[in-house]
Amino acid sequence: MKAVSYDRLVTKNWVNFKAAVPRGGISMLDETLLFKWMTEFDHQIQTDKAYLSGLDAEIGDGDHGDNMARGMSAVMHTFKTPNQSVAEQLKAIAFALISKVGGAAGPLYGSAFLRMSKAAVDTQQLDQLIQIGADAIADRGGANFGDKTMLDVWAYVPAMLEHHTLSSAGLAQLAAHTKPMQAKKGRASYLGERSVGHLDPGAVSSQELFQALLKAQSALKTSPNQALKNGTD
């Protein structure tokens, strides 16, 4: 999948960049940030699982929230293995999602994290890793941006990270833009025009994934010496 350019984002006016908070420097993914990121995501998924399943019930099987909650519980268990590198931990996350998340979401999220794990051997730059994850989702699902899928969030995040404009409001706007779309992939595509007017649940959970990243980055900037706990209190 061709990377979505920053100019494309601005031209389409899909995201209100005035709401974004500029951030300096290149964002890197280390073990501490990865643990905090997944912890924040797990908390949000467990909180919103009924909401996510409700969204899925409108255009799918109605189990996206429950599936993701089960998968994230398994993800957090992987952190109990000590002294894993970022690449090793991303791989463990991928296999947990593939094995525990049903429907299309498990293979798609799992493929993203698995390819990110392979790339993390050579780079831990977040925008590059997320782009690689987005490419994996596009390859696995055969989707492109505009098809009313989780890719409609993932595809735009690398440019936002690169230009330091990733924000909670911007992510919410990306997910919201799936509502007027007609689904072209997945079970929702069977509904045709009836899929219009509904949020894509995978896009919403992806919104929450990257909002969790923002929360994790903010928390670690507040407490820069916080140690990785490997899943223990």
Image: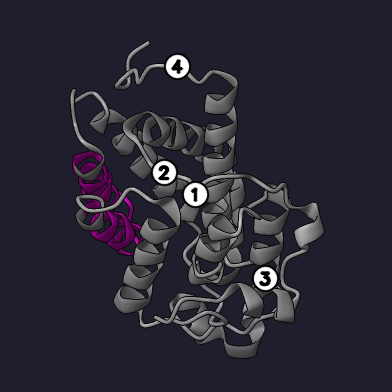
Disc 3 + disc 1, Cβ < 8 Å? no
* Type of amino acid at the residue the image marks with label 3: His
* Type of amino acid at the residue the image marks with label 4: Gln
**Which-is-in-front pick, marks 4 and 2?**
2
The residue under label 2 is 28
Farthest residue to the bottom: give it.
Answer: 192
The residues bearing labels 1 and 4 have C-alpha atoms spaced at a distance of 30 Å
| Magenta stretch encompasses residue 92 | yes
Q: Is residue 190 above or below residue 226?
A: below
Give the main secondary structure of the magenta stretch: helix
The residues bearing labels 3 and 1 have C-alpha atoms spaced at a distance of 16 Å
The residue under label 4 is 226
Q: SS class of the residue under badge 1?
A: helix
Q: Is residue 73 above or below residue 8?
A: above
Residue 56 seen anywhere in this rendered image of the structure: no
> Residue 145: x, y in percent?
53, 79
Q: Is residue 12 above or below residue 153?
A: below
* Residue in the foreground of this view, choosing between 233 and 19: 19
Q: SS class of the residue under badge 4?
A: loop
Question: Residue at 27% across / 28% down in the picture?
Answer: 79
Image quadrant where residue 1 sits: bottom left
| Mark closer to the chain start, 2 or 1 | 2
* Type of amino acid at the residue the image marks with label 2: Met
Give the label on residue 65, or none: 1
> Residue 164: x, y in percent?
61, 53
The residues bearing labels 3 and 2 have C-alpha atoms spaced at a distance of 35 Å
Please report the bounds of the magenta region as a residue range: 88-117
The residue under label 3 is 198
Farthest residue to the front: give it.
Answer: 25
